[in-house]
Amino acid sequence: LVLLADVSGEGLPSSCDRRGELNERQHPVDRPGEVGLCGDACESLLGGQDEPDVGREVGGLAGGSGGTISNSYATGPVSGTGTDVGGLVGHVWYGSISDSYATGNVGSSDLYTGGLIGYAGYNNGEGVVFTPSVTRTYATGAVTNTHGGYSYAGGLIGANEGTVANSYATGAVNGNSG
Protein backbone atom coordinates (compact mmCIF):
# COMPACT_ATOMS: atom_id res chain seq x y z
CA LEU A 1 0.00 0.00 0.00
CA VAL A 2 1.49 3.29 -1.09
CA LEU A 3 -0.20 6.59 -0.35
CA LEU A 4 1.59 9.91 -0.31
CA ALA A 5 -0.75 11.78 2.00
CA ASP A 6 0.38 15.20 3.08
CA VAL A 7 -0.87 15.86 6.58
CA SER A 8 2.36 17.50 7.73
CA GLY A 9 2.66 20.11 4.99
CA GLU A 10 5.57 18.42 3.24
CA GLY A 11 4.86 18.04 -0.48
CA LEU A 12 5.73 15.38 -3.00
CA PRO A 13 8.81 15.60 -5.20
CA SER A 14 8.26 18.11 -8.00
CA SER A 15 8.15 15.40 -10.65
CA CYS A 16 5.53 13.41 -8.74
CA ASP A 17 6.81 10.29 -10.50
CA ARG A 18 4.89 7.40 -8.97
CA ARG A 19 5.12 4.82 -11.77
CA GLY A 20 5.00 1.27 -10.46
CA GLU A 21 3.29 2.22 -7.20
CA LEU A 22 -0.12 0.89 -6.19
CA ASN A 23 -3.06 2.66 -4.60
CA GLU A 24 -5.25 1.28 -1.82
CA ARG A 25 -7.16 -0.94 -4.29
CA GLN A 26 -3.87 -2.39 -5.57
CA HIS A 27 -4.28 -0.71 -8.97
CA PRO A 28 -1.44 1.13 -10.70
CA VAL A 29 -1.44 4.77 -9.69
CA ASP A 30 -1.06 6.26 -13.16
CA ARG A 31 -3.66 4.51 -15.30
CA PRO A 32 -4.50 5.65 -18.84
CA GLY A 33 -7.46 8.01 -18.86
CA GLU A 34 -6.79 9.48 -15.41
CA VAL A 35 -4.94 12.71 -15.93
CA GLY A 36 -3.74 15.32 -13.53
CA LEU A 37 -0.47 16.18 -11.89
CA CYS A 38 -0.35 12.62 -10.49
CA GLY A 39 -3.03 10.66 -12.34
CA ASP A 40 -4.90 8.68 -9.66
CA ALA A 41 -5.07 9.46 -5.93
CA CYS A 42 -2.38 12.11 -5.65
CA GLU A 43 -2.68 13.53 -2.14
CA SER A 44 -0.29 16.36 -1.54
CA LEU A 45 0.33 20.06 -1.00
CA LEU A 46 0.99 21.08 -4.59
CA GLY A 47 0.17 23.96 -6.89
CA GLY A 48 -1.38 23.94 -10.35
CA GLN A 49 0.40 22.78 -13.47
CA ASP A 50 0.02 23.17 -17.22
CA GLU A 51 -3.40 22.52 -18.71
CA PRO A 52 -4.15 18.81 -19.09
CA ASP A 53 -6.45 17.99 -22.02
CA VAL A 54 -7.36 14.36 -22.68
CA GLY A 55 -10.18 11.91 -22.07
CA ARG A 56 -12.05 10.99 -18.92
CA GLU A 57 -11.18 11.73 -15.27
CA VAL A 58 -9.17 14.88 -15.77
CA GLY A 59 -8.20 17.24 -12.94
CA GLY A 60 -5.70 20.00 -12.27
CA LEU A 61 -4.21 17.99 -9.38
CA ALA A 62 -5.50 14.45 -9.90
CA GLY A 63 -7.64 12.63 -12.41
CA GLY A 64 -9.18 10.50 -9.69
CA SER A 65 -9.00 10.04 -5.93
CA GLY A 66 -10.10 7.43 -3.43
CA GLY A 67 -8.28 8.83 -0.42
CA THR A 68 -7.68 12.10 1.39
CA ILE A 69 -6.70 15.33 -0.29
CA SER A 70 -6.12 18.34 1.95
CA ASN A 71 -4.39 21.72 1.81
CA SER A 72 -4.10 21.42 -1.96
CA TYR A 73 -4.80 23.65 -4.91
CA ALA A 74 -4.69 23.94 -8.70
CA THR A 75 -4.52 27.26 -10.52
CA GLY A 76 -4.34 26.40 -14.23
CA PRO A 77 -7.14 25.78 -16.74
CA VAL A 78 -8.38 22.20 -17.19
CA SER A 79 -10.19 20.72 -20.18
CA GLY A 80 -11.21 17.26 -21.30
CA THR A 81 -13.22 15.47 -23.94
CA GLY A 82 -14.59 12.73 -21.68
CA THR A 83 -16.55 12.48 -18.44
CA ASP A 84 -15.46 13.64 -14.98
CA VAL A 85 -13.50 16.86 -15.49
CA GLY A 86 -12.74 19.09 -12.49
CA GLY A 87 -10.50 22.02 -11.64
CA LEU A 88 -8.86 20.05 -8.81
CA VAL A 89 -9.99 16.42 -9.24
CA GLY A 90 -11.91 14.74 -12.04
CA HIS A 91 -13.59 11.98 -9.99
CA VAL A 92 -13.58 11.53 -6.22
CA TRP A 93 -14.88 8.00 -5.59
CA TYR A 94 -14.73 8.07 -1.80
CA GLY A 95 -12.64 9.67 0.92
CA SER A 96 -12.43 13.41 1.42
CA ILE A 97 -11.22 16.73 0.10
CA SER A 98 -10.71 19.54 2.59
CA ASP A 99 -9.09 22.97 2.80
CA SER A 100 -8.45 22.98 -0.94
CA TYR A 101 -9.31 25.11 -3.97
CA ALA A 102 -9.13 25.52 -7.74
CA THR A 103 -9.00 28.83 -9.63
CA GLY A 104 -8.65 27.86 -13.30
CA ASN A 105 -11.39 27.70 -15.91
CA VAL A 106 -12.75 24.20 -16.59
CA GLY A 107 -14.19 22.89 -19.85
CA SER A 108 -15.55 19.59 -21.14
CA SER A 109 -17.62 18.21 -23.99
CA ASP A 110 -19.04 15.28 -21.99
CA LEU A 111 -20.85 14.65 -18.69
CA TYR A 112 -19.86 15.82 -15.17
CA THR A 113 -17.86 19.04 -15.22
CA GLY A 114 -17.14 21.07 -12.07
CA GLY A 115 -14.99 23.97 -10.95
CA LEU A 116 -13.48 21.82 -8.18
CA ILE A 117 -14.66 18.24 -8.85
CA GLY A 118 -16.28 16.71 -11.92
CA TYR A 119 -18.02 13.83 -10.13
CA ALA A 120 -18.07 13.09 -6.39
CA GLY A 121 -19.21 9.63 -5.32
CA TYR A 122 -19.80 6.20 -6.72
CA ASN A 123 -22.95 4.16 -7.25
CA ASN A 124 -22.80 0.89 -9.15
CA GLY A 125 -26.59 0.55 -9.19
CA GLU A 126 -26.39 -2.66 -7.17
CA GLY A 127 -26.25 -1.22 -3.68
CA VAL A 128 -22.60 -0.21 -3.54
CA VAL A 129 -22.52 3.53 -2.89
CA PHE A 130 -19.58 5.70 -1.82
CA THR A 131 -20.22 9.18 -0.45
CA PRO A 132 -17.09 11.34 -0.22
CA SER A 133 -16.98 14.48 1.91
CA VAL A 134 -15.96 17.91 0.63
CA THR A 135 -15.23 20.49 3.33
CA ARG A 136 -13.82 24.05 3.35
CA THR A 137 -13.23 24.20 -0.40
CA TYR A 138 -13.87 26.67 -3.19
CA ALA A 139 -13.62 27.18 -6.93
CA THR A 140 -13.44 30.50 -8.75
CA GLY A 141 -12.98 29.60 -12.43
CA ALA A 142 -15.68 29.55 -15.09
CA VAL A 143 -17.14 26.14 -15.98
CA THR A 144 -18.18 25.41 -19.56
CA ASN A 145 -19.75 22.19 -20.79
CA THR A 146 -20.71 21.77 -24.45
CA HIS A 147 -22.43 18.37 -24.15
CA GLY A 148 -25.94 18.34 -25.57
CA GLY A 149 -28.78 17.42 -23.23
CA TYR A 150 -28.04 17.19 -19.55
CA SER A 151 -24.38 17.95 -18.99
CA TYR A 152 -24.21 17.99 -15.17
CA ALA A 153 -22.11 21.14 -14.97
CA GLY A 154 -21.60 22.93 -11.65
CA GLY A 155 -19.52 25.75 -10.26
CA LEU A 156 -18.19 23.56 -7.44
CA ILE A 157 -19.13 19.95 -8.37
CA GLY A 158 -20.66 18.65 -11.60
CA ALA A 159 -22.53 15.76 -9.93
CA ASN A 160 -22.45 14.91 -6.24
CA GLU A 161 -23.43 11.84 -4.20
CA GLY A 162 -21.47 12.89 -1.11
CA THR A 163 -21.62 15.64 1.50
CA VAL A 164 -20.50 19.25 1.08
CA ALA A 165 -19.91 21.72 3.92
CA ASN A 166 -18.45 25.24 4.12
CA SER A 167 -17.68 25.34 0.40
CA TYR A 168 -18.52 27.73 -2.43
CA ALA A 169 -18.03 28.61 -6.09
CA THR A 170 -17.99 32.04 -7.75
CA GLY A 171 -17.33 31.30 -11.43
CA ALA A 172 -19.95 31.43 -14.19
CA VAL A 173 -21.42 28.10 -15.33
CA ASN A 174 -22.43 27.39 -18.92
CA GLY A 175 -24.08 24.00 -19.53
CA ASN A 176 -27.22 22.05 -18.80
CA SER A 177 -27.57 20.79 -15.22
CA GLY A 178 -29.07 17.38 -14.54
Image: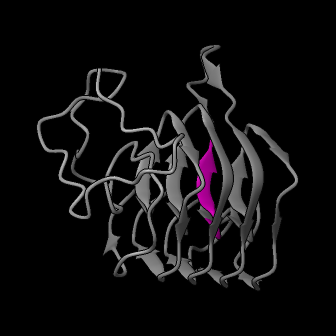
| Residue occupying the point 38% across, 58% down | 56
Name the image colouring. one colour
x, y percent for residue 154: 73, 67
**Residue 168 located left or right of residue 84:** right
Residue 21 appears in the rendering: yes
Give the side of residue 110 with respect to residue 152, left or right: left
Q: Position of residue 147 (x, y in %)?
A: 56, 73
Q: Quadrant of the N terminus?
A: top left
Seen as rendered, the residue at the extreme top is 127
The correct choice, above or below, for 7 with respect to 125 in the image is below
- Against 49, is 61 above or below? above
Q: Tell me if I can see residue 57 in this picture.
A: no
Instruction: Give yes or no for residue 65 being in the magenta stretch.
Output: no
| Residue at left offset 33%, top offset 63% | 55
Is 56 displayed left or right of 98 in the figure? left
Is 60 on the left or on the right of 99, as rendered? left
User: Who is closer to the viewer here, 11 or 21?
Assistant: 11
Q: Looking at the image, is 132 positioned above or below residue 164?
A: above
Magenta portion: prevailing SS class: strand
